Image (cartoon, rainbow, N blue to C red):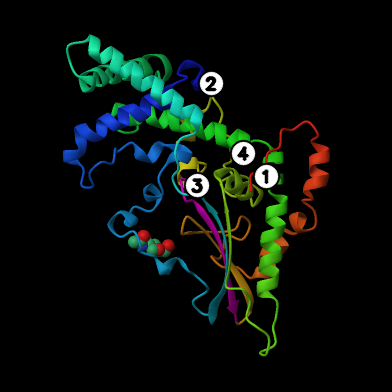
């Protein structure tokens, strides 16, 4: 695995990106943003997925709501599962960053140039090393060698997410059974027929969590499941993969279930990071009838009993973060 070869690579990347920002800020339209920012996996900022927010942080694209145009519909309820926004690094990583920073200062004070010369030097050495030892034969997908290396590191982090929290093991998705049931109970309640005298449903149910909350739930729903699983050996075949953690679970990632009241009955639309995503098996429509969504997930609605499933996998190391 890549991590064996370069255990501190992500720290190095962080340091390099700080340098690159300063070196190239004059050529960027928005200052202080390294062009490698899209490849930080689960540490990617939300604006990489929705760049229009860089121009206007409050803008909302209402044309993502797509009930059938030939049917009268109105949105009546929203269930949202939202990851927290950007956060400080963990204590472990803060200590590593500190060590790296000390190393940089120490080495820089030995040489004749400043820290930026020193970083520039290690960057070029690192790129050479990456090209020679790891990426032998990798096509430069992008012209910039640093971006090419970043894509390898991004892949390494996607491998971790895939095998620890997603389709790599069925148990990861099953850890979301209680959340799955909660979401559908809420939608059932919001969508059930009402007399005109009854109160309208709760307009929204907002659940807050982590990347570790969203990834297993998305996996359970059958999303981002490529035909070939990503492994340490098939990087070359995975360029077009849908499983890119920086696109799926950047900071502030969000999964929205929009329930519409329509002429033919309730309909449900899925939005991931504010973009429409179709339910696997119901790809013909953006907002299929809610009863068809329930039929598609019947096996989970009638099963997916977390307590029973975890008995089937007694040795798995399950962790659920609320
Ligand atoms: C708004 O959403 C629509 C539908 O998903 C999309 O085609 C369009 O590009 C989006 N506009 C912006 C500015 O992102």
Looking at the image, in which quadrant does ligand 1 appear? Answer: bottom left
From the top left corner, tell me how far across and down residue 243 is, in percent.
52, 42
- The circle on residue 1 is 2
Which residue is tagged 3?
248
Whether residue 254 is in magenta: the answer is yes
Mark before the other along the chain sequence, 4 or 2: 2
Front-lying residue, 152 or 12: 12
Which residue is tagged 4?
165
Mark before the other along the chain sequence, 1 or 4: 4
Front-lying residue, 60 or 223: 60
Circle 2 — which element? Answer: loop
- In the rendered view, tell whether residue 127 sits above or below residue 158: above
Cα distance in 3D space between marks 4 and 2: 18 Å
Which residue is tagged 1?
173
Mark before the other along the chain sequence, 1 or 3: 1
Few, some or many C-alpha atoms within 10 Å of disc 2 (few <14, some 14-19, many ≥20)? few
Circle 4 — which element? Answer: helix
Circle 3 — which element? Answer: helix
Cα distance in 3D space between marks 2 and 3: 23 Å
Whether residue 147 is in magenta: the answer is no
Mark before the other along the chain sequence, 3 or 4: 4
- Examine the rendering and report whether any part of residue 133 can be seen: yes
């Amino acid at each position: 695995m890549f991590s064996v070869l370069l255990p501190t690579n992500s720290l190095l990347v962080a340091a390099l990106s700080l340098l690159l920002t300063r070196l190239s800020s004059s050529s960027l339209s928005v200052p202080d943003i390294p062009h490698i920012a899209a490849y930080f996996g689960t540490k990617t900022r939300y604006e990489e997925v929705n760049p229009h927010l860089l121009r206007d942080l409050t803008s909302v694209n209402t044309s993502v709501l797509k009930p059938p145009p030939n049917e009268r519909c109105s949105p009546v309820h929203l269930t949202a599962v939202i990851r927290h926004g950007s956060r400080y690094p963990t204590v472990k990583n803060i200590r590593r960053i500190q060590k790296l920073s000390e190393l940089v200062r120490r080495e820089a004070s030995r040489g004749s140039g400043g820290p930026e010369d020193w970083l520039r030097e290690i960057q070029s050495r690192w790129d050479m090393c990456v090209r020679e030892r790891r990426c032998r034969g990798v096509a430069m997908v992008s012209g910039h060698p640093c971006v090419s290396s970043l894509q390898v590191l991004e892949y390494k982090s996607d491998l971790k997410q895939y095998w620890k929290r997603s389709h790599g093991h069925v148990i990861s998705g099953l850890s979301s059974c209680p959340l799955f049931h909660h979401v559908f109970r809420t939608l059932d309640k919001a969508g059930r027929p009402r007399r005109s005298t009854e109160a309208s449903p709760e307009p929204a149910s907002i659940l807050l969590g982590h990347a570790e909350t969203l990834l297993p739930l998305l996996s359970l729903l059958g999303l981002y499941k490529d035909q070939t699983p990503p492994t340490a050996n098939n990087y070359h075949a995975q360029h077009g993969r849908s499983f890119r953690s920086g696109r799926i679970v950047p900071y502030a990632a969000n999964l929205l279930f929009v329930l519409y009241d329509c002429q033919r009955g309730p309909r449900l639309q899925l939005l991931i990071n504010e973009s429409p995503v179709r339910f696997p098996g119901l790809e013909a429509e953006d907002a299929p009838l809610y009863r068809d969504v329930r039929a598609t997930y019947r096996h989970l609605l009638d099963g997916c009993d977390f307590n029973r499933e975890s008995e089937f996998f007694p040795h798995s190391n399950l962790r659920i973060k609320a």
